[in-house]
Image (cartoon, coloured by chain):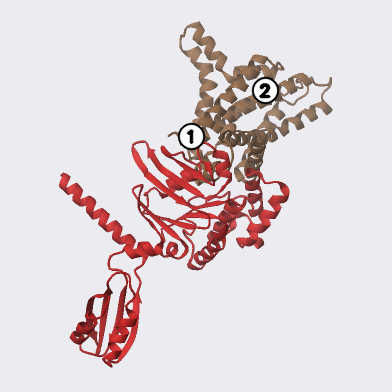
Amino acid sequence: MIEAAHITKWYGPTLAVDDLSFSIPKGKIVGFLGPNGAGKSTTLRILTGYLPPTAGTATVAGHNVTKAAESARAAVGYMPENNPLYLEMRVEEFLQFRAKLFRLDKKTTSERIDTVCDRCGLSQLRRRVIGHLSKGNRQRVGLAQALLHNPKVLILDEPTAGLDPIQIVEIRKFLEELRNDHAILLSSHILAEIEKVADRIMIIRKGKMIADGTVDDLRGKAKGGSRVTVETQAEPSAVKSKLEKVAGVARVETSSAAGWCRAEITPKGEGDVREKVLAAVTAESWPTRGVGQRQVSLEDYYMQVFREMDEAEHKKEAKAT
Amino acid sequence: MRHTLTIAKRELLSLFYSPIGYVVLGLFSFGAAIVFARSFEPGAPATLREPFQFTAYFLIFLAPAISMRLISEENRSGSIELLVTAPVADSAVVLGKWVAALTFFLTLLTPFVVFWIVYLFTAKPMPDWGPFISGMVGLMLVGGFYLAIGTFTSALTNNQTIAFLIGVFIICALTFLMEYLPRQLSLAPKYQKLMFAIDVNRRYADFARGLIDLTHVVYFASGSMLFLFLAGMIVQSRRWR
């Protein structure tokens, strides 16, 4: 549905997007991550036809965004950064205006407005002036206009920016409902959010793709992997030597507090060692409370990648000088 | 074309939603009425020449005030992005905005129709229709031209005030500067002639007198097209900047 092939964008002497290639099929939600100024919005603007790429090609729903600009734009629903709307208009008026721009006929227009208002929770607010709505409701209007012409591709630039936790959950549910019929590309700063909703994540840094994969792929790449913890009443040194012999365990660190020994176990590779760990401690008849696993979050991976890259760059610079 | 009208309709709506629309409407009607009342006396000729001339001068500020927000506001809020990522041509955006501003300006001219009706009922002999019609046509042409300039300056920036000031400056250059420079400087006659030819007020004076000169019509129409074209180029310039 969305294909980008080697897209590059220069703003004068500044390189904003550097040879990005990716492909997003129907039915997928892809999260687009990166720090401010990494080129996320520029990439989205290229895909929506707002800006042409300096080099490379982008196609949405089979239409080249520069050569078949109008049909490409008709296939995309777009919510730009900061969700700009005409604040003086009423919700319904605004949606009617957008419908005309997308050449929907009268019957389709009224049907679609009913549908999107219903879906975005705007049915009670149709006659309200947009400028009088709360930020969350304006966000709904932004989503409603993006969905109005039933586009195959949805491109949302920070759809959850500035929303409260309840509203963020609503948007997430909403995107999940839309997943089946659309290809969705959304950018965000909120890693925890993206982690929950996206099937796949692309991370860019200084215009370059530095990671592209499913949430699990990226978590797996994080150093350290997941950790298993167990708390038992026994000598820490005994616990350590016992657990280190369990198959699949790479390393054990122990600490004790109030008579309990807490062991943190780093497994070898991806395997789940909880069962074996539990079997080992019960075989010794040590009183045990709780075996747990701490998942590495996307944030761990994100921070790690950026720290490594920054350090590498500093070293390079230091060498050069 | 359909998109142009759709955009024009929306723009007109927001012109009438904004307080500045009514301020402009009120101030203009007030000014025109005062000028009309001064020329409305026994024995005086029943023409609207003076209010027409007044309007031509007033338009120097009025037109940029109407047009200053057209595109600059879209640039500022970012809604331009939403507008041009719909399957709409950039030219339809510019043209639609200008049509809206022109329509708003034409509603400003309703006081003239009222003044004219007053003359029709009070003046003897019947006033001459010719100068009224030519004066109105002239105002539309000058208004269209100035609003095209205003649309262009509005596309240049995301600040309404700057758009207004640059607009006033350009229009002043096309009126006062062209009127006074040739007199103040001892220029070669061909340059003098050129400057007089550019002077908008000199051309409008003919309309106010009752003369529709085709060269004036061509001047205003092509001037409007030039600035609308430039505005289109500015909107499009994001693509190659």
Residue A25 appearing in the image: yes
**Apparent colour of chain B:** brown
Q: Secondary structure at mark 2?
A: helix
* Residue extending furthest toward the top: B189
Q: Secondary structure at mark 1?
A: helix
In the displayed structure image, the side of residue A259 where residue B228 appears, left or right: right
| A268 or A72: nearer the viewer | A268
Residue B156 is labelled as: 1
Mark 2 vs mark 1, CA separation in Å? 27 Å
For label 1, the crowd category at 10 Å Cα-Cα, with few meaning under 14, some 14 to 19 and many 20 or more, is: some
Residue depicted at x 73% and y 30%: B112
In the displayed structure image, the side of residue B11 where residue A311 appears, left or right: left
Q: Which residue is mark 2?
A: B138
- The image shows residue B170 at horizontal and vertical percentages of 51, 26
Amino acid type shown at disc 2: Gly
For label 2, the crowd category at 10 Å Cα-Cα, with few meaning under 14, some 14 to 19 and many 20 or more, is: many
Evaluate whether label 2 is on the same chain as label 1: yes
Residue depicted at x 72% and y 17%: B210
Vertical order, A180 against A237 (above or below): above
Q: Specify the subunit that label 1 lies on.
A: B
Residue depicted at x 21% and y 51%: A314
Image quarter in which the C terminus of chain B is found? top left
Label located before the other in sequence (2 or 1): 2
Residue depicted at x 83% and y 21%: B126
Among the chains pictured, the one given red colouring is A
- The image shows residue B125 at horizontal and vertical percentages of 84, 19
Residue B30 appearing in the image: no
- The image shows residue B215 at horizontal and vertical percentages of 64, 14
- The image shows residue A118 at horizontal and vertical percentages of 65, 61
Image quarter in which the N terminus of chain B is found? top right
Vertical order, A14 against A147 (above or below): above
